Amino acid sequence: MKRILVLGMALMLSAATFAQKNITQFMGIPIDGTKSAMIQKLKAKGFKYNATDDVLSGQFNGRNVLLRVVTNNNKVYRIIVSDEVGTTEGEIKIRFNTLCNQFDNNRKYIGFYHFEISSDEDVSYGISVLNKRYEADFYQISDKEKDTTGFFQWFSENLLDVYTSFYNRLPDNLKHKDLSSEEQDSLIEILESELLMNFFLQKISHKSVWFMISESYGYYYINIFYDNVLNMANGEDL
């Protein structure tokens, strides 16, 4: 009996440890805990803390940046990484596209929504007049989360919802015609890709990492957001 209790406690501790690690990380630091503890961990990484402005400064991905730690109910849920020095419109388009490629080529991330900014895009007009957001969204994913074990159970449980959603988004000309075998194969490939993406998103949707362009007095900045969605406000105070 004692051995069973000890084994049970060990399993619970292992589960708790995995849950703690299975959240968004910034430079290997889980985005969780108190703000003061997070600041100490970031200082240990070489960042310097300015208590007056409540901001940390240092180097990240080859650039001088400012870090801000954001909390909800005394729990850290976001790290914001901002360029310390702004740049020109032409340079920010190159930086945005380069950053998208870096995330795409990093096995720790799955892309959810991003696009390439063309060289002739008027970013200034897009932001100031069209209120356009130049944003790219990714999710952190671990090797364990890449495991597709359990996919078929998830597939059987969600097939109707996924199929209905997929069918409703089809153009009307495809809903009411007999499809050729090539068209059917193409749609099946799209549906399979969507199913796998939805399966992974269910496992990693709380580990969001996204970035966007901001503008201030004619200078442009990249802001990267590392979010632990589990610690965000979810209407509990309403």
Image: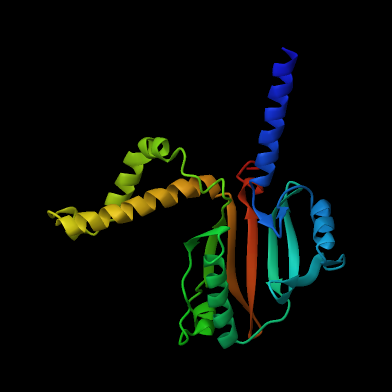
Q: Residue at x 76, y 72 (%)?
A: 59
Relative vertical location of residue 23 with respect to residue 136 in this rendering, above or below: above
Compare residues 117 and 109 and report the one nearer the observer.
109
- Name the residue at the top extreme: 1
Residue 84 percent coordinates (x, y): 73, 77
Compare residues 9 and 77 and report the one nearer the observer.
9
**How many tags in the picture?**
0
Compare residues 58 and 67 and report the one nearer the observer.
58
Q: Residue at x 26, y 55 (%)?
A: 187
Q: Is residue 19 left or right of residue 182?
A: right
Residue 237 percent coordinates (x, y): 66, 42
- Name the residue at the front extreme: 3
- Name the residue at the right extreme: 51
- Is the image coloured rainbow, by chain, by secondary structure, or in one colour? rainbow
Q: Is residue 114 left or right of residue 20?
A: left
Residue 50 falls in which quadrant of the image? bottom right
- Name the residue at the left extreme: 178
Relative vertical location of residue 14 with respect to residue 118 in this rendering, above or below: above
Q: Which part of the image, by quadrant, shows the C terminus?
A: top right
Q: Residue at x 82, y 58 (%)?
A: 39
Q: Which part of the image, by quadrant, shows the N terminus?
A: top right
Residue 4 percent coordinates (x, y): 69, 17
Relative vertical location of residue 46 with respect to residue 175 in this rendering, above or below: below
Q: Residue at x 76, y 47 (%)?
A: 33
Residue 40 percent coordinates (x, y): 84, 56
